[in-house]
Image: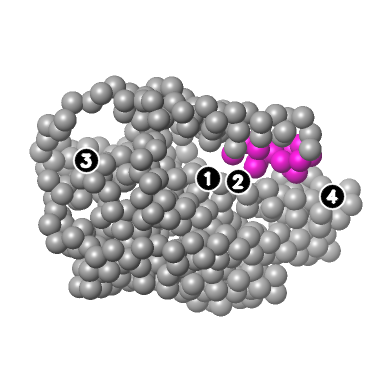
Amino acid sequence: MPALIVSRAVQGVGAGGLMTLSQTTIADLVSPRERGRYQGAIAGVFALCSVAGPLVGGLITDMLSWPWIFYINLPIGAAALAILSVSLRPHVGRPSRGVDWLGFGLLIGATCTWLLLLSWGGVVYPWLSAPVLGLAALTVVMVGVLVPVEHRAAEPAVPPHLFHDRVFTVGVAVVTLSTAALFGALVFIPLFFQVVLGASATEAGLRMAPMMGGLIISAVLGGRMVTKTGRYKLYPVVGLAAASGVFVAMAWAARAGASANAFDGLLVALGLGIGLIMPNMTTAVQNAVAPSDIGIATATLGFFRSLGGALGVAVSGAILAATLHARIPAGQGGVVNAGLTELRDLPAALRAEVLGAYGHALSATFATAAVVSLLAFALVVFLPDRKLRDAPHR
Protein backbone atom coordinates (compact mmCIF):
# COMPACT_ATOMS: atom_id res chain seq x y z
CA MET A 1 0.00 0.00 0.00
CA PRO A 2 2.76 2.59 0.69
CA ALA A 3 4.16 1.92 -2.82
CA LEU A 4 0.70 2.50 -4.33
CA ILE A 5 0.27 5.74 -2.38
CA VAL A 6 3.67 7.12 -3.41
CA SER A 7 3.10 6.09 -7.04
CA ARG A 8 -0.30 7.76 -7.02
CA ALA A 9 1.28 10.98 -5.75
CA VAL A 10 3.89 10.94 -8.54
CA GLN A 11 1.22 10.15 -11.14
CA GLY A 12 -0.91 13.00 -9.80
CA VAL A 13 1.89 15.51 -10.37
CA GLY A 14 1.78 14.74 -14.07
CA ALA A 15 -1.94 14.16 -14.50
CA GLY A 16 -3.22 17.01 -12.34
CA GLY A 17 -2.94 19.66 -15.02
CA LEU A 18 -4.15 17.72 -18.05
CA MET A 19 -7.85 18.59 -17.79
CA THR A 20 -7.09 22.18 -16.75
CA LEU A 21 -4.67 22.73 -19.64
CA SER A 22 -7.07 21.29 -22.21
CA GLN A 23 -9.86 23.59 -20.99
CA THR A 24 -7.52 26.59 -20.93
CA THR A 25 -6.33 25.86 -24.47
CA ILE A 26 -9.93 25.78 -25.69
CA ALA A 27 -10.63 29.05 -23.85
CA ASP A 28 -7.72 30.65 -25.73
CA LEU A 29 -9.14 29.64 -29.11
CA VAL A 30 -12.94 29.69 -28.78
CA SER A 31 -15.40 32.37 -27.62
CA PRO A 32 -17.26 31.73 -24.33
CA ARG A 33 -20.54 31.32 -26.21
CA GLU A 34 -19.12 28.63 -28.51
CA ARG A 35 -17.21 27.06 -25.64
CA GLY A 36 -20.27 25.26 -24.30
CA ARG A 37 -20.16 22.82 -27.21
CA TYR A 38 -16.51 22.05 -26.58
CA GLN A 39 -16.91 21.66 -22.83
CA GLY A 40 -19.82 19.32 -23.49
CA ALA A 41 -17.65 17.29 -25.86
CA ILE A 42 -14.87 17.06 -23.24
CA ALA A 43 -17.40 15.93 -20.63
CA GLY A 44 -18.78 13.36 -23.07
CA VAL A 45 -15.34 11.92 -23.81
CA PHE A 46 -14.52 11.91 -20.09
CA ALA A 47 -17.74 10.05 -19.34
CA LEU A 48 -17.18 7.54 -22.13
CA CYS A 49 -13.68 6.79 -20.86
CA SER A 50 -15.03 6.56 -17.31
CA VAL A 51 -17.28 3.74 -18.52
CA ALA A 52 -14.52 2.01 -20.45
CA GLY A 53 -12.02 2.32 -17.59
CA PRO A 54 -13.90 0.40 -14.88
CA LEU A 55 -15.17 -2.11 -17.45
CA VAL A 56 -11.72 -2.85 -18.88
CA GLY A 57 -10.26 -2.78 -15.38
CA GLY A 58 -12.81 -5.34 -14.21
CA LEU A 59 -12.11 -7.58 -17.20
CA ILE A 60 -8.34 -7.36 -16.65
CA THR A 61 -8.75 -8.08 -12.93
CA ASP A 62 -10.96 -11.11 -13.59
CA MET A 63 -8.91 -12.52 -16.49
CA LEU A 64 -5.33 -11.61 -15.49
CA SER A 65 -4.50 -9.89 -12.21
CA TRP A 66 -4.93 -6.43 -10.75
CA PRO A 67 -1.35 -5.15 -11.44
CA TRP A 68 -2.22 -5.25 -15.14
CA ILE A 69 -4.67 -2.37 -14.67
CA PHE A 70 -1.54 -0.21 -14.36
CA TYR A 71 0.39 -1.76 -17.24
CA ILE A 72 -2.47 -1.03 -19.66
CA ASN A 73 -1.91 2.70 -19.14
CA LEU A 74 1.58 2.61 -20.65
CA PRO A 75 0.60 2.22 -24.34
CA ILE A 76 -2.36 4.59 -23.85
CA GLY A 77 -0.11 7.24 -22.33
CA ALA A 78 2.46 6.78 -25.10
CA ALA A 79 -0.21 7.30 -27.76
CA ALA A 80 -1.49 10.47 -26.05
CA LEU A 81 2.06 11.82 -25.75
CA ALA A 82 2.71 11.16 -29.44
CA ILE A 83 -0.48 13.00 -30.46
CA LEU A 84 0.41 16.01 -28.31
CA SER A 85 3.96 16.13 -29.64
CA VAL A 86 2.74 16.26 -33.24
CA SER A 87 -0.48 18.28 -32.96
CA LEU A 88 -0.13 20.92 -30.25
CA ARG A 89 1.95 23.90 -31.37
CA PRO A 90 3.83 25.73 -28.60
CA HIS A 91 2.75 29.24 -27.67
CA VAL A 92 4.98 31.72 -25.86
CA GLY A 93 3.06 33.58 -23.16
CA ARG A 94 4.11 36.21 -20.68
CA PRO A 95 7.15 35.36 -18.53
CA SER A 96 6.45 33.80 -15.15
CA ARG A 97 7.09 35.87 -12.05
CA GLY A 98 8.13 32.80 -10.04
CA VAL A 99 6.39 29.94 -8.28
CA ASP A 100 4.62 30.53 -4.98
CA TRP A 101 6.28 27.59 -3.24
CA LEU A 102 5.23 28.72 0.24
CA GLY A 103 1.62 29.13 -0.86
CA PHE A 104 1.58 25.72 -2.52
CA GLY A 105 3.13 24.12 0.56
CA LEU A 106 0.55 25.64 2.89
CA LEU A 107 -2.27 24.72 0.52
CA ILE A 108 -1.14 21.10 0.27
CA GLY A 109 -0.54 20.87 4.00
CA ALA A 110 -3.96 22.27 4.92
CA THR A 111 -5.65 19.96 2.41
CA CYS A 112 -3.88 16.87 3.75
CA THR A 113 -4.56 17.62 7.41
CA TRP A 114 -8.23 18.33 6.65
CA LEU A 115 -8.62 15.07 4.75
CA LEU A 116 -6.89 13.12 7.54
CA LEU A 117 -9.21 14.74 10.07
CA LEU A 118 -12.28 13.63 8.12
CA SER A 119 -10.86 10.14 7.53
CA TRP A 120 -9.75 9.47 11.11
CA GLY A 121 -12.40 11.32 13.12
CA GLY A 122 -14.89 8.93 14.67
CA VAL A 123 -13.27 5.91 12.99
CA VAL A 124 -9.60 5.63 13.96
CA TYR A 125 -9.76 8.17 16.78
CA PRO A 126 -12.68 9.74 18.71
CA TRP A 127 -13.71 13.19 17.46
CA LEU A 128 -12.53 14.87 20.66
CA SER A 129 -9.22 12.97 20.83
CA ALA A 130 -5.84 14.75 20.76
CA PRO A 131 -4.87 13.61 17.20
CA VAL A 132 -8.15 14.81 15.65
CA LEU A 133 -8.16 18.11 17.54
CA GLY A 134 -4.50 18.59 16.65
CA LEU A 135 -5.26 18.10 12.95
CA ALA A 136 -8.11 20.60 13.20
CA ALA A 137 -5.88 23.18 14.86
CA LEU A 138 -3.10 22.61 12.32
CA THR A 139 -5.55 23.06 9.42
CA VAL A 140 -6.85 26.34 10.85
CA VAL A 141 -3.30 27.65 11.43
CA MET A 142 -2.13 26.81 7.90
CA VAL A 143 -5.22 28.39 6.30
CA GLY A 144 -4.75 31.46 8.50
CA VAL A 145 -1.14 31.80 7.34
CA LEU A 146 -2.03 31.04 3.70
CA VAL A 147 -4.36 34.04 3.30
CA PRO A 148 -1.78 36.81 3.95
CA VAL A 149 0.89 34.86 2.05
CA GLU A 150 -1.33 34.77 -1.04
CA HIS A 151 -2.04 38.51 -0.79
CA ARG A 152 1.71 39.25 -0.89
CA ALA A 153 2.85 36.67 -3.47
CA ALA A 154 3.79 37.91 -6.95
CA GLU A 155 2.25 34.83 -8.59
CA PRO A 156 -0.09 33.41 -5.90
CA ALA A 157 -1.14 29.76 -5.97
CA VAL A 158 -4.75 30.86 -5.41
CA PRO A 159 -5.14 34.57 -6.36
CA PRO A 160 -7.36 36.27 -3.76
CA HIS A 161 -8.75 38.79 -6.26
CA LEU A 162 -10.59 36.01 -8.11
CA PHE A 163 -12.91 35.60 -5.12
CA HIS A 164 -14.07 39.20 -5.52
CA ASP A 165 -16.11 38.02 -8.51
CA ARG A 166 -19.46 36.52 -7.50
CA VAL A 167 -19.60 34.13 -10.46
CA PHE A 168 -16.21 32.69 -9.56
CA THR A 169 -16.98 32.38 -5.84
CA VAL A 170 -20.38 30.74 -6.35
CA GLY A 171 -18.97 28.58 -9.15
CA VAL A 172 -16.14 27.26 -6.97
CA ALA A 173 -18.53 26.50 -4.10
CA VAL A 174 -21.05 24.74 -6.36
CA VAL A 175 -18.38 22.67 -8.13
CA THR A 176 -16.79 21.65 -4.81
CA LEU A 177 -20.08 20.57 -3.26
CA SER A 178 -21.51 18.86 -6.34
CA THR A 179 -18.26 16.92 -6.87
CA ALA A 180 -18.22 15.94 -3.19
CA ALA A 181 -21.77 14.62 -3.51
CA LEU A 182 -21.03 12.79 -6.77
CA PHE A 183 -17.79 11.10 -5.72
CA GLY A 184 -19.06 10.41 -2.21
CA ALA A 185 -21.72 8.22 -3.83
CA LEU A 186 -19.93 7.15 -7.00
CA VAL A 187 -17.02 5.43 -5.28
CA PHE A 188 -19.37 3.15 -3.34
CA ILE A 189 -21.87 2.27 -6.07
CA PRO A 190 -19.67 -0.59 -7.38
CA LEU A 191 -19.36 -1.77 -3.75
CA PHE A 192 -23.17 -1.91 -3.57
CA PHE A 193 -23.33 -3.99 -6.75
CA GLN A 194 -20.58 -6.38 -5.61
CA VAL A 195 -21.37 -6.81 -1.92
CA VAL A 196 -25.13 -6.37 -1.66
CA LEU A 197 -26.20 -7.59 -5.12
CA GLY A 198 -23.42 -10.17 -5.60
CA ALA A 199 -22.09 -8.84 -8.93
CA SER A 200 -18.58 -9.61 -10.23
CA ALA A 201 -15.94 -6.89 -10.71
CA THR A 202 -16.65 -6.84 -14.45
CA GLU A 203 -20.41 -6.61 -13.98
CA ALA A 204 -20.03 -3.86 -11.38
CA GLY A 205 -17.97 -1.83 -13.87
CA LEU A 206 -20.51 -2.45 -16.63
CA ARG A 207 -23.35 -1.33 -14.36
CA MET A 208 -21.85 2.17 -14.30
CA ALA A 209 -22.46 2.54 -18.05
CA PRO A 210 -26.08 3.79 -17.74
CA MET A 211 -25.01 6.76 -15.63
CA MET A 212 -22.23 7.71 -18.03
CA GLY A 213 -24.60 7.32 -20.97
CA GLY A 214 -26.97 9.82 -19.39
CA LEU A 215 -24.05 12.14 -18.64
CA ILE A 216 -22.85 12.07 -22.26
CA ILE A 217 -26.32 12.92 -23.57
CA SER A 218 -26.97 15.81 -21.19
CA ALA A 219 -23.43 17.24 -21.45
CA VAL A 220 -23.49 17.36 -25.24
CA LEU A 221 -27.06 18.63 -25.54
CA GLY A 222 -26.64 21.09 -22.66
CA GLY A 223 -23.47 22.48 -24.23
CA ARG A 224 -25.26 23.03 -27.53
CA MET A 225 -28.15 24.77 -25.78
CA VAL A 226 -25.73 27.09 -23.99
CA THR A 227 -24.15 27.97 -27.32
CA LYS A 228 -27.59 28.62 -28.83
CA THR A 229 -29.00 30.75 -26.01
CA GLY A 230 -25.84 32.40 -24.65
CA ARG A 231 -27.02 31.65 -21.09
CA TYR A 232 -25.75 29.02 -18.66
CA LYS A 233 -27.53 29.29 -15.28
CA LEU A 234 -30.66 27.22 -16.01
CA TYR A 235 -28.71 24.03 -16.72
CA PRO A 236 -26.80 23.56 -13.42
CA VAL A 237 -29.97 24.54 -11.52
CA VAL A 238 -31.96 21.78 -13.26
CA GLY A 239 -29.04 19.36 -13.01
CA LEU A 240 -28.56 19.79 -9.25
CA ALA A 241 -32.29 19.52 -8.60
CA ALA A 242 -32.38 16.24 -10.52
CA ALA A 243 -29.21 14.90 -8.86
CA SER A 244 -30.52 15.68 -5.37
CA GLY A 245 -33.75 13.79 -6.04
CA VAL A 246 -31.84 10.82 -7.44
CA PHE A 247 -29.54 10.63 -4.41
CA VAL A 248 -32.60 10.50 -2.15
CA ALA A 249 -34.07 7.69 -4.28
CA MET A 250 -30.73 5.83 -4.19
CA ALA A 251 -30.65 6.02 -0.40
CA TRP A 252 -34.13 4.48 -0.26
CA ALA A 253 -33.24 1.83 -2.87
CA ALA A 254 -30.10 0.72 -1.00
CA ARG A 255 -31.98 0.40 2.28
CA ALA A 256 -34.94 -1.41 0.69
CA GLY A 257 -32.76 -3.81 -1.30
CA ALA A 258 -33.97 -2.69 -4.74
CA SER A 259 -33.02 -4.72 -7.81
CA ALA A 260 -30.04 -3.95 -10.01
CA ASN A 261 -32.34 -2.92 -12.88
CA ALA A 262 -34.09 -0.35 -10.68
CA PHE A 263 -30.70 1.03 -9.67
CA ASP A 264 -29.71 1.26 -13.33
CA GLY A 265 -32.67 3.57 -13.98
CA LEU A 266 -31.60 5.83 -11.12
CA LEU A 267 -28.05 5.97 -12.49
CA VAL A 268 -29.34 7.12 -15.89
CA ALA A 269 -31.23 9.97 -14.20
CA LEU A 270 -28.15 10.84 -12.12
CA GLY A 271 -25.98 11.03 -15.24
CA LEU A 272 -28.51 13.29 -16.97
CA GLY A 273 -28.37 15.67 -14.01
CA ILE A 274 -24.58 15.68 -13.51
CA GLY A 275 -23.93 16.29 -17.21
CA LEU A 276 -25.63 19.68 -16.96
CA ILE A 277 -23.47 20.91 -14.07
CA MET A 278 -19.71 20.60 -14.53
CA PRO A 279 -19.18 21.78 -18.15
CA ASN A 280 -21.46 24.78 -17.74
CA MET A 281 -19.89 25.87 -14.46
CA THR A 282 -16.49 25.89 -16.18
CA THR A 283 -17.91 28.00 -19.01
CA ALA A 284 -19.46 30.44 -16.52
CA VAL A 285 -16.20 30.92 -14.59
CA GLN A 286 -14.08 31.37 -17.72
CA ASN A 287 -16.57 33.91 -19.06
CA ALA A 288 -16.43 35.93 -15.82
CA VAL A 289 -12.68 36.38 -15.30
CA ALA A 290 -10.19 38.53 -17.19
CA PRO A 291 -8.30 36.96 -20.13
CA SER A 292 -5.05 36.96 -18.16
CA ASP A 293 -6.73 34.98 -15.37
CA ILE A 294 -8.24 32.21 -17.53
CA GLY A 295 -5.48 29.71 -16.76
CA ILE A 296 -5.32 30.25 -13.01
CA ALA A 297 -9.11 30.46 -12.67
CA THR A 298 -9.54 27.15 -14.51
CA ALA A 299 -6.76 25.59 -12.43
CA THR A 300 -8.29 26.84 -9.17
CA LEU A 301 -11.66 25.47 -10.20
CA GLY A 302 -9.99 22.16 -11.00
CA PHE A 303 -8.28 22.12 -7.60
CA PHE A 304 -11.53 22.67 -5.74
CA ARG A 305 -13.19 20.04 -7.93
CA SER A 306 -10.51 17.54 -6.89
CA LEU A 307 -10.74 18.70 -3.29
CA GLY A 308 -14.50 18.22 -3.33
CA GLY A 309 -14.10 14.70 -4.69
CA ALA A 310 -11.53 13.82 -2.03
CA LEU A 311 -13.69 15.32 0.74
CA GLY A 312 -16.73 13.44 -0.54
CA VAL A 313 -14.91 10.12 -0.53
CA ALA A 314 -13.39 10.78 2.92
CA VAL A 315 -16.70 11.79 4.53
CA SER A 316 -18.67 8.98 2.88
CA GLY A 317 -16.00 6.46 3.83
CA ALA A 318 -16.11 7.60 7.44
CA ILE A 319 -19.92 7.39 7.49
CA LEU A 320 -19.81 3.94 5.86
CA ALA A 321 -17.29 2.61 8.39
CA ALA A 322 -19.10 4.12 11.39
CA THR A 323 -22.47 2.71 10.27
CA LEU A 324 -20.98 -0.73 9.64
CA HIS A 325 -19.34 -0.85 13.07
CA ALA A 326 -22.65 0.16 14.66
CA ARG A 327 -24.67 -2.52 12.83
CA ILE A 328 -22.29 -5.48 12.60
CA PRO A 329 -23.17 -8.12 15.23
CA ALA A 330 -21.19 -8.00 18.47
CA GLY A 331 -17.89 -9.84 18.25
CA GLN A 332 -17.88 -9.79 14.44
CA GLY A 333 -16.25 -6.39 13.90
CA GLY A 334 -13.45 -8.00 11.89
CA VAL A 335 -15.75 -8.57 8.92
CA VAL A 336 -15.74 -4.82 8.25
CA ASN A 337 -12.24 -5.22 6.79
CA ALA A 338 -12.99 -8.53 5.07
CA GLY A 339 -12.70 -8.94 1.31
CA LEU A 340 -15.51 -10.03 -1.00
CA THR A 341 -14.43 -13.67 -1.00
CA GLU A 342 -14.34 -13.74 2.81
CA LEU A 343 -17.81 -12.16 3.01
CA ARG A 344 -19.26 -14.76 0.65
CA ASP A 345 -17.73 -17.57 2.73
CA LEU A 346 -19.46 -16.44 5.96
CA PRO A 347 -22.21 -18.63 7.46
CA ALA A 348 -25.59 -17.90 5.84
CA ALA A 349 -27.16 -16.23 8.90
CA LEU A 350 -24.15 -14.01 9.61
CA ARG A 351 -23.77 -13.15 5.93
CA ALA A 352 -27.39 -11.97 5.79
CA GLU A 353 -26.80 -9.69 8.79
CA VAL A 354 -23.58 -8.32 7.30
CA LEU A 355 -25.20 -7.66 3.92
CA GLY A 356 -28.07 -5.89 5.67
CA ALA A 357 -25.55 -3.73 7.52
CA TYR A 358 -23.85 -2.87 4.24
CA GLY A 359 -27.22 -1.91 2.73
CA HIS A 360 -27.91 0.50 5.61
CA ALA A 361 -24.35 1.90 5.53
CA LEU A 362 -24.45 2.55 1.78
CA SER A 363 -27.88 4.11 2.17
CA ALA A 364 -26.35 6.53 4.69
CA THR A 365 -23.62 7.52 2.20
CA PHE A 366 -26.20 8.19 -0.53
CA ALA A 367 -28.31 10.23 1.91
CA THR A 368 -25.23 12.30 2.75
CA ALA A 369 -24.69 12.91 -0.97
CA ALA A 370 -28.30 14.11 -1.21
CA VAL A 371 -27.77 16.65 1.60
CA VAL A 372 -24.56 17.98 0.02
CA SER A 373 -26.22 18.16 -3.42
CA LEU A 374 -29.15 20.10 -1.99
CA LEU A 375 -26.71 22.58 -0.45
CA ALA A 376 -25.07 23.04 -3.86
CA PHE A 377 -28.53 23.57 -5.37
CA ALA A 378 -29.26 26.29 -2.78
CA LEU A 379 -26.03 28.06 -3.75
CA VAL A 380 -26.38 27.82 -7.53
CA VAL A 381 -29.63 29.77 -7.31
CA PHE A 382 -27.46 32.82 -6.48
CA LEU A 383 -25.19 32.35 -9.53
CA PRO A 384 -25.32 35.48 -11.75
CA ASP A 385 -26.50 34.62 -15.27
CA ARG A 386 -24.24 36.81 -17.41
CA LYS A 387 -24.46 36.86 -21.18
CA LEU A 388 -21.71 34.79 -22.77
CA ARG A 389 -19.31 36.79 -24.93
CA ASP A 390 -19.09 36.10 -28.67
CA ALA A 391 -15.36 36.90 -29.00
CA PRO A 392 -12.57 34.54 -27.85
CA HIS A 393 -9.90 35.51 -25.33
CA ARG A 394 -6.65 36.45 -27.08
Residue topped by disc 1: 310
Residue positioned 56% across, 46% down in the render = 311
Question: How many C-alpha atoms fall within 10 Å of the one at disc 3: few (<14), some, or many (≥20)?
Answer: few
- Name the amino acid, label 3: Ser
Q: Give the image quarter of residue 102.
A: top left
* Cα distance in 3D space between marks 2 and 1: 6 Å
Question: How many C-alpha atoms fall within 10 Å of the one at disc 1: few (<14), some, or many (≥20)?
Answer: some
Q: Nearer the viewer, residue 314 or 73?
A: 314
Q: Earlier in the sequence, mark 1 or mark 3?
A: 3
* Cα distance in 3D space between marks 2 and 3: 35 Å
* Cα distance in 3D space between marks 2 and 4: 24 Å
Q: Give the image quarter of residue 140.
A: top right
Residue topped by disc 2: 314
Residue 143 drawn at (x, y percent): 54, 32
Image: 223 above or below 262 = above
Residue topped by disc 4: 332
* Cα distance in 3D space between marks 3 and 4: 58 Å
Residue positioned 54% across, 69% down in the render = 244
